[in-house]
Amino acid sequence: MLNLFGRRRKSASADGQNEAPQGELPRHVAIIMDGNGRWAHRRGLPRIAGHHAGMKTVREVIRACDDFGIPCLTLYAFSTENWKRPEGEVEYLMRLPEEFFRSEIDELVDRGVQVRFIGDTTKLPTHTQETVRRTLERTKTNDGMTVNFALNYGGRAEVVEAVRAVAREVAAGVLDADALDEDKFAIHLSTHGLPDPDLVIRTSGEVRLSNFLIWQAAYAELWFTDVLWPDFDRDQLRQALTEYTGRMRRFGGLK
Ligand code: V07
């Protein structure tokens, strides 16, 4: 059902499935989607089967965030380190954006989701870049939640790129080096226009940031789970959010 703004209304389902935890929700959730390979291995399946299952979780988590009213979600889909994986696996991963586009774009548009990308997409195969372009094109006028895919992303590389941009401004005489501050610096990051992540989630038991949003996550709450990414679902997300709102209540006003 469409509301006055032509957007689909969030329907409160009878089973409470769509209900967000009470309290101050994060404005931006960022997720390191780890454990696809291990999930597949445990089932005697090839790693790519894990990535495929992981893509279904991406769909479910976007739906859940939209239903809960989380305005922004960033997903670490491919890191600059991931090129070191076997060639066949990388090739498969580079097809996932197309597959996702094919099966999900209508629902994303219907929900008013705006898709963005961070990372150096110019180094991706042409067919992947083409999907990135089409996805941006199809969702650019949407005014619902933002889903930000990190593709060929590395936090340090992003910071270095921003430093380069600042250095160019200083060299060109448009910026006084002493006038540089955190806000003026952050303008040059690829997340410009998005709020900093309030909550970073990592699945599959690793307790590290692994070069993900290192500048932006400076004040983020961190939540780790042993659940493998393909097994992550709405209920785990709700758990993470419930813990987040609890922490906010306890530290209310002090942060
Ligand atoms: C990828 C599935 C999720 C688990 C982590 C790694 C594998 C969704 C996308 C995607 C990318 C662009 C886009 C829409 C969806 C994706 C890669 C890997 C490279 F516009 N999942 N997913 N891209 N995995």
Image (spheres, rainbow, N blue to C red):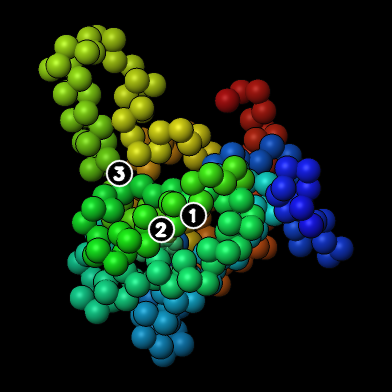
Q: Is residue 4 left or right of residue 217?
A: right
Q: Which residue is mark 3?
A: 155
Any mark on residue 134, and which? 2
Q: Mark 1 or mark 3: which is in front?
A: 1
Q: Are marks 2 and 1 in contact (CB under 8 Å)?
A: yes
Q: Secondary structure at mark 3?
A: helix
Where in the figure is residue 118, as x and y percent of width and height? 36, 47
Using the numbered discs, state the Cα–Cα distance from disc 3 to disc 2 in whole angstroms: 25 Å
Q: Are marks 3 and 2 in contact (CB under 8 Å)?
A: no
Q: Is residue 92 left or right of residue 166?
A: right
Q: Secondary structure at mark 2?
A: helix
Residue that appears at 40% across and 66% down:
97
Q: Is residue 138 left or right of residue 159?
A: right
Q: Is residue 185 left or right of residue 55?
A: left
Going by the numbered disc 3, the residue's amino acid type is: Gly
Residue that appears at 70% across and 49% down:
7
Any mark on residue 138, and which? 1
Out of 224 and 53, give the one closest to the viewer. 53
Q: Which numbered disc, 1 or 3, marks the residue that appears first in the sequence? A: 1
Where in the figure is residue 56, as x and y percent of width and height? 53, 72
Using the numbered discs, state the Cα–Cα distance from disc 1 to disc 3 in whole angstroms: 27 Å
- Residue 180: quadrant of the picture: top left
Q: Mark 3 or mark 2: which is in front?
A: 2
Q: Are marks 1 and 3 in contact (CB under 8 Å)?
A: no
Q: Which numbered disc, 3 or 2, marks the residue that appears first in the sequence? A: 2
Residue that appears at 27% across and 40% down:
158
Please state, as top left, top right, bottom left or bottom right, where the N terminus lies in the image.
bottom right
